[in-house]
Image (cartoon, rainbow, N blue to C red):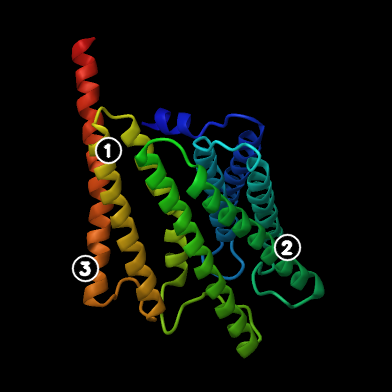
Amino acid sequence: MVTQVWTAVRPHGGAQRFLWWCGTLLLASAVAHSVVAVVDGTPWLGSVSWRKPIVFGASFGLLAWSVVWVLRNMQRRWLRWPVVVLLGGFSVFEVALISMQVWRGQPSHFNNTSPFDEKVFELMGQSVLAVAAAIGLLLVWAVFDLRGSAVVRVAALAGITAQVVAGYIGTRLIAEGDAVVAATGHVPEDLVFGAAGSAKLAHAIGIHGIQVLAVLAILLEGTRLAPRARLSAMLIATVGYAGAYTAVTLTAYDGRPWTDPTVLLGVLGLFGVVGVAVGYLRALMARDVADERTVVVA
């Protein structure tokens, strides 16, 4: 399975290789900062923490690799370079700025204690806007030009759409942080919606939805299931993911922690998780059957 996923995200052509290496650099940075965090032993949470280069490096790196997979299923070549330069180049720039601030012992976000720190945060915001523009361009491009099986199209379009929604939640996070700084004069240690809404969790689920769905699509494509059965499993998982994402997001906007949703949203979230699990179990069970058949034939 690992080999199958690895093969699916290997780049073809110069644009894909550029984006793939950007993602590899970001993932390597996340690993390196993980080692530093273990050795240093400082707290994981807080406005100045090794958590930030680790989490941002891993998230942007996985996003870059995921978009390589999407690009392998696109036809029009002339749009590739604008997408990969915006996404890959500014993702690296964003994480580099975050990492620099942590090494300096300064908060990377909402820090206006000096003109330099204020300029860094401004550049970070511009970088995120460039990445968001790349995702928006990719979504429009994919709607009209995405090829591959129905399973691939569902996974890619749903995953990119989730990224767009996560971007909107990110703008709300920035607004909340700016409000805290304006009210207190201090960089917030954490950000929530309302009293205790899990804003960061809702943002993270949207960012990583494309990986959840893309990996499932890759696994389903490697089974001997009929096309209709593959699509059915993919749709169940996609609807499940959308349900869980909606439940966590609405709970956050309601100002409640994700562990204390309303009954309705709790049921929606539970059914969503079950839907994703059903899709993966269907893919894994079908792979086991295919492997057993291969062994028997051999």
Q: Disc 1 marks which residue?
A: 230
Going 42% across and 34% down the picture, which residue do you hit?
5
Categorize mark 1 by other alpha carbons within 10 Å: few (<14), some (14-19), many (20+): many
The x, y position of residue 124, in whole percent, is 69, 63
In the shown orientation, is residue 18 left or right of residue 235?
A: right
Q: Nearer the viewer, residue 183 or 283?
A: 283
> In terms of secondary structure, where does tag 2 sit?
helix
Q: Amino acid at mark 1?
A: Arg
Going 63% across and 78% down the picture, which residue do you hit?
187
Categorize mark 3 by other alpha carbons within 10 Å: few (<14), some (14-19), many (20+): some
Mark pair 1, 3: CA separation: 26 Å
Q: Nearer the viewer, residue 224 or 170?
A: 224
The answer to whether one can see residue 38 in this image is no
Closer to the observer: label 1 or label 2?
1
Q: Nearer the viewer, residue 179 or 36?
A: 179
The answer to whether residue 54 is above or below residue 120 is above
The x, y position of residue 100, in whole percent, is 71, 58
Q: Disc 3 marks which residue?
A: 267
Q: Amino acid at mark 2?
A: Arg
The x, y position of residue 135, in whole percent, is 57, 54
Closer to the observer: label 1 or label 3?
1
Nearer the N terminus, badge 1 or badge 2?
A: 2
In the shown orientation, is residue 173 left or right of residue 274?
A: right
Q: Disc 2 marks which residue?
A: 104
Going 23% across and 62% down the picture, which residue do you hit?
270
The answer to whether one can see residue 91 in this image is yes
The x, y position of residue 37, in whole percent, is 57, 54
Going 23% across and 24% down the picture, which residue do you hit?
290
Mark pair 3, 2: CA separation: 45 Å
In the shown orientation, is residue 134 left or right of residue 249?
A: right
